[in-house]
Image (cartoon, grey):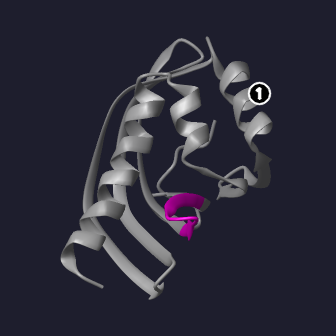
């Protein structure tokens, strides 16, 4: 794939993060496949567009993204209509009224349908020791 194809995927990923920062749920939804998969520390889920809208509504007042930085973005194209992007994410946010910084390794699989790239799978893994030894016990 050409460099401009890689940049298009990078731009889409940044646009999705910006839509979360802007609380623009409809832009986020427009970028998702009919059913998208999310996987992370809390498990996994299959989300319809309405599920995503509900998740965004439920998070109001509990979670707010304040800023983000995406680094070391790499893109691969397993086929002409599938792109996978992986990168490091740093997010400043408020969770249940308390400031928090999250550092994670993220990956998104984009699929091309009817000429448009749609997010079909997103994973997020918190950075740090995989056994949690770097976290303090409560």
Using residue 135 as the reference point, say whether residue 52 is left or right of it: right
Report the magenta residues as a range.
111-119
Q: Nearer the viewer, residue 64 or 95?
A: 64
Asked if 91 appears above or below 77 in the picture, the reply is above
Q: Residue at x 38, y 81 (%)?
A: 76
Q: Is residue 89 visible?
A: no
Q: Quick check: 96 left or right of 44?
A: left
Q: Which residue is mark 1?
A: 54
Rendered residue at 54%/11% (across/down)? 97
Image vertical order of residue 118 relative to residue 55, above or below: below
The secondary element bearing badge 1 is classed as helix
Q: Where residue 49 appears, x then y in whole percent?
A: 73, 40
> How many discs appear?
1
Q: Nearer the viewer, residue 112 or 129?
A: 112
* Quadrant containing the C terminus in the rendered view: top right
Q: Position of residue 110 (x, y in %)?
A: 52, 66
Q: Residue 75, located in which quarter of the rendered image?
A: bottom left
Instruction: Say if 14 sits above or below 129 in the image.
Output: above
């Amino acid at each position: 794939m050409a460099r401009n194809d890689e940049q298009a995927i990078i731009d889409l990923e940044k646009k999705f993060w910006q839509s979360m920062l802007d609380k623009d749920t409809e832009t986020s939804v427009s970028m998702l496949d009919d059913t998208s998969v999310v996987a992370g520390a809390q498990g996994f889920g299959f989300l319809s567009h309405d599920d995503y809208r509900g998740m965004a509504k439920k998070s109001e007042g509990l979670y707010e993204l304040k800023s983000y930085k995406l680094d070391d973005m790499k893109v691969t194209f397993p086929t002409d209509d599938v792109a996978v992007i992986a990168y490091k994410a740093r997010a400043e946010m408020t969770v249940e009224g308390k400031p928090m910084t999250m550092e994670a390794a993220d990956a998104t699989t984009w699929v091309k349908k009817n000429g448009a790239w749609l997010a079909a799978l997103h994973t997020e893994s918190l950075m740090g020791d995989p056994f949690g030894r770097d976290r303090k016990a409560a």
